[in-house]
Image: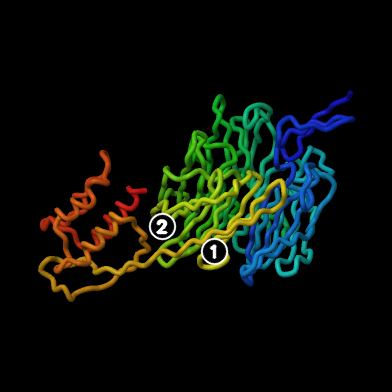
């Protein structure tokens, strides 16, 4: 019996003339790659790759779209493009000109096993502008696209190195960025991480109004986990404004994401550790880390959060490994785990994308062996807290202003806030704070006396707000 091996979607597929078997079960054979994009008029469009609807276990993916009605989301697949062999994983973005760009790794008619291809369409009616099959690179793979103003940036990998990685299938070799104009014409290509010294692949990208943020995994020889890499690109100059560097180590393969949080002007990076648990970063447009939290639930493989801008920050809701979602409260310089919600559905790993349908409904479209699965979660907005601002003991109790902070603290923090508001002179003796908060400060944490306003040995209401937030974080 003659048998040969071919890489399709970089999942090992062993084919024989009599029967077809798989070296390892890979559910991406059904569906792989999903995005939810917002049109200029605010409407939502789902874009994904699937081997039919419902899907079958064969690498014959085409790319489908469906409008997402914010009031009543129902998946109605319409084929956007397709060809022999697989077009996956789908990645989509809408630029400021109102053009939808879709890119994918394409197994059709490629000289080097696969090719990174794309098409450009009107976001309003999907009329072709520069339709598939447009070519980024023959031999390119695993690409993802983002809009930066009127431009689009495709971040993609090239080459393959056998051995290591997931199931010892190997890794990609180099990562590049292609910069395209508003109509999809390629303007330039930037080497992001290229050379024989490293093995880099699974490149993801997020876009602000001026920059593209790149994250990808770098193979570590002899290790079962990857280094998570980060870099920034200015699409106007085509130059990297933050050179490639390691953001985190010990990251589980393929379990990370990057998004732009518009209300904070920050890039949010989420990742899972190989040993369990997760980490989140906020980075500014210089590439500097503004905040970090290393004690959050792990994100599901190929998961994307739903983001919401709040009055004094932002909320990120992401699909956590196993099922349900984790909820993060974000400011420009802080990341706080504010809650989790369970759900009976266990996310699969072929792609999950989230978006807020309205102020309180986080919606997720998740790929599965049965088709696109929809899940929704109610996420209340943070409650505004109105407290007096800081005054000295000698000041009049009528000299009050209000501050609005999105706190939803637990019991101990609530008691601290209550103590602040019931004090006759808008200050609370240190003994009161000690009784309600000292017990939740474990050894090695900053002592509560840090927040005393000297020399009065008392806490102003503003200091109480800081302490309440701190205690809320400790209690998590």
- In the rendered image, residue 260, in percent from the top left (x then y), is placed at 53, 56
Name the residue nearer the viewer: 347 or 283. 347
Instruction: State how the image is colored.
Output: rainbow
Residue 135 in the image: above or below residue 423: above
Of label 2 and label 1, which has the lower sequence position? Answer: 2
| Res 210 visible | no
Callout 1 crowding tier (Cα within 10 Å): few <14, some 14–19, many ≥20:
some
How many numbered discs? Answer: 2
In the visual, does 5 lie left or right of 468? right
Residue at mark 2: 332
* Residue beneath the point at 44% across and 65% down: 381
Residue 77 falls in which quadrant of the image? bottom right
| Res 65 visible | yes
Residue 142 falls in which quadrant of the image? top right
C-alpha gap between disc 2 and disc 1: 23 Å
* Residue beneath the point at 56% across and 24% down: 222
Tell me the element at label 1: strand
Residue at mark 1: 361
Tell me the element at label 2: loop
- In the rendered image, residue 114, in percent from the top left (x then y), is placed at 77, 41
* Residue beneath the point at 85% across and 29% down: 16
Task: Tell which tag, 2 or 1, sits nearer the viewer.
Answer: 1
Q: Quadrant of the N terminus?
A: top right
Name the residue nearer the viewer: 153 or 107. 107
Residue 407 is marked as none
Residue lying farthest to the bottom in this orientation: 398
In the visual, does 133 lie left or right of 247? right
Callout 2 crowding tier (Cα within 10 Å): few <14, some 14–19, many ≥20:
some
- In the rendered image, residue 211, in percent from the top left (x then y), is placed at 55, 56
- In the rendered image, residue 411, in percent from the top left (x then y), is placed at 30, 56
């Amino acid at each position: 019996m003659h048998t040969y091996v071919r890489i399709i979607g970089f999942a090992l597929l062993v084919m024989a003339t009599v029967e077809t078997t798989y070296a390892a079960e890979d559910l991406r054979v059904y569906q792989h790659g999903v995005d939810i994009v917002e049109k200029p008029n605010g409407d939502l469009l789902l874009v994904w790759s699937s081997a039919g609807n419902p899907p079958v276990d064969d690498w014959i993916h085409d790319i489908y779209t469906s409008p997402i009605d914010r009031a009543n989301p129902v998946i109605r697949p319409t084929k956007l493009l397709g060809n022999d062999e697989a077009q996956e994983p789908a990645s989509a973005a809408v630029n400021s000109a109102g053009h939808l760009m879709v890119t994918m790794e394409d197994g059709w008619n490629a000289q080097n096993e696969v090719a990174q291809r794309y098409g450009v369409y009107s976001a309003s009616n999907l009329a072709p502008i520069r339709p598939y099959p447009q070519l980024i690179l023959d031999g390119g793979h695993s690409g993802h696209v983002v809009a930066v103003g009127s431009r689009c940036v495709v971040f993609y990998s090239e080459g393959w190195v056998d051995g290591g990685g997931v199931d010892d299938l190997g890794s990609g070799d180099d990562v590049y960025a292609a910069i395209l104009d508003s109509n999809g014409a390629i303007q330039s290509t930037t080497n992001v991480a290229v050379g024989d010294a490293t093995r880099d692949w699974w490149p993801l990208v997020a876009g602000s109004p001026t920059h593209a943020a790149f994250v990808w995994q770098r193979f570590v020889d002899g290790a079962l986990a990857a280094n998570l890499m980060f870099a920034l690109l200015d699409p106007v100059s085509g130059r990297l404004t933050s050179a490639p560097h390691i953001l985190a180590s010990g990251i589980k393969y393929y379990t990370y994401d990057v998004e732009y949080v518009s209300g904070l002007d920050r890039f949010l990076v989420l990742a899972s550790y190989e040993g369990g648990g997760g980490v989140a970063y906020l980075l500014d447009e210089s590439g500097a880390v503004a905040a970090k939290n290393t004690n959050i639930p792990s994100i599901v493989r190929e998961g994307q959060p739903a983001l919401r801008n709040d009055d004094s920050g932002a909320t990120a809701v992401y699909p956590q490994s196993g099922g349900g979602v984790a909820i993060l409260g974000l400011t420009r310089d802080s990341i706080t785990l504010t809650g989790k919600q369970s759900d009976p559905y266990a996310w699969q790993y072929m792609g999950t994308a989230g978006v807020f349908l309205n102020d309180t409904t986080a919606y997720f479209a998740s790929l599965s062996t049965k088709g696109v699965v929809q899940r929704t979660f109610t996420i209340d907005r943070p409650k505004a807290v109105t407290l007096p601002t800081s005054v000295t003991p000698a000041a009049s109790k009528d000299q009050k202003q209000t501050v609005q902070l999105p706190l939803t603290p637990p019991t101990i923090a609530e008691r601290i806030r209550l103590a602040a508001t019931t004090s006759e002179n808008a200050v609370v003796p240190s003994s009161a704070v000690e009784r309600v908060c000292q017990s939740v400060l474990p050894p090695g944490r900053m002592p509560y006396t840090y927040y005393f306003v000297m020399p009065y040995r008392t806490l102003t209401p503003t200091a109480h707000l800081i302490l309440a937030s701190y205690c809320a974080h400790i209690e998590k």
